[in-house]
Amino acid sequence: MSADELRRRFEEVGVIEGSTVISYCGSGVTACHNLLALEVAGFAPGRLYPGSWSQYSRTADADIATGSSPG
């Protein structure tokens, strides 16, 4: 995928110049692909939440929505 296409896709989900992007996934590994793509697209480096879902979901008081229509 070209840098222009990556940029367009990030912009479609609300990333703009100067955005702070924090990437996470299930364990923190796949999120790094998003961070690399972000830089290839010409945006500032993002940040990784390395604990990702695996850590957050174990937090006793975490706000976690479930069901077919969370929120």
Image (cartoon, rainbow, N blue to C red):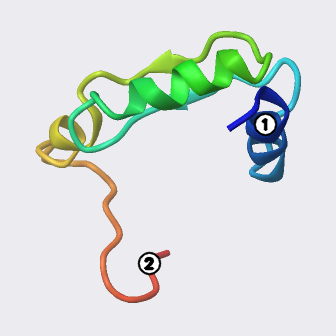
Q: What secondary structure is found at the residue carrying circle 1? A: loop
**Mark 1 lies on residue:** 15
Give the labeled residue for mark 2. Answer: 70
Q: Nearer the viewer, residue 56 or 52?
A: 52
Closer to viewer: mark 1 or mark 2: 1
Quarter occupied by residue 64: bottom left
At x 33% / y 56%, what residue is drawn?
63
- Residue 65 horizontal side relative to residue 16, left or right: left
Q: Quadrant of the N terminus?
A: top right
Q: In the image, what residue occupies the spot 11% across and 44% down?
A: 58
Q: Name the residue rendered at 17%, 35% in the picture.
A: 55
Point out the tag, 1 or 2, that comes first from the N-terminus.
1
What residue is at 38 percent from the left and 89 percent from the top? Answer: 68
**Horizontal and vertical percent position of residue 3:** 77, 27
- Figure check: 40 above or below 28: above
Q: How many other residues sit within 10 Å of disc 1, few (<14), some (14-19) or many (≥20)?
A: some
Which residue ends up furthest to the front in the rendered image? 1
Q: CA distance from mark 1 to mark 2?
A: 23 Å
